[in-house]
Amino acid sequence: MNVVKVRKNFLLDKEVVEKAQKIIQNQHKNLTEVIGLYFKAIVKEPSILETIEKSANRRTGSFIGMLDGEIGNENYREMKKETFKESEI
C-alpha cells in the first residue's frame, strides 16, 4: 500500500475532531481509517460529498435549524417581488 503525506499545514478544528473521535472509537475505528473510508466512498459515489456537506452545514438546536432544507432556495429579491405582486391583487 502506498502512503501519501497530505501536507504539514493540514489543520482541523480541535473541538470537532475530539467530538468525532468519541464517535469513531465507539465504532472501533481510528481517525486514519475513517479518513481513508471517506475518500473511498467519495471515489465510488461522488454525490455523497453533497450529502455530507448538507449534513455538516445543517444548523441544530434552534427553531431556524428545523427549517433547513424545508424553505427552499429562493432569492430574496424574487420573494420580495412575489409578495409585492400578491399585495397588488
Image (cartoon, grey):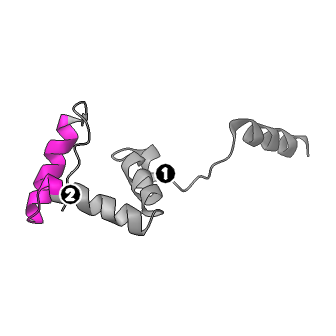
- Residue drawn at x 17%, y 59% is 33
Magenta: main secondary structure:
helix
- Circles 2, 1 touching at the beta carbon (< 8 Å): no
Q: Residue furthest bottom?
A: 44
Q: Left or right: where does residue 74 sit relative to residue 7?
A: right
Residue located 39% across and 64% down the image: 43
Start-end of magenta stretch? 14-32
Q: Residue 69 at what x, y percent from top left?
A: 52, 55
Pinpoint residue 20: horizontal percent, then vertical percent: 18, 50
Label 2: state its secondary structure: loop
Which disc is residue 2 wearing?
A: 2
- The image quadrant where one finds the N terminus is bottom left
Q: Is residue 63 left or right of residue 5?
A: right
Identify which amino acid the numbered label 1 is placed on: Asp
Between 71 and 40, the one nearer to me in the picture: 40
Q: Nearer the viewer, mark 2 or mark 1?
A: 2
Q: Position of residue 22 (x, y in %)?
A: 11, 53
- What residue does disc 1 label? 68
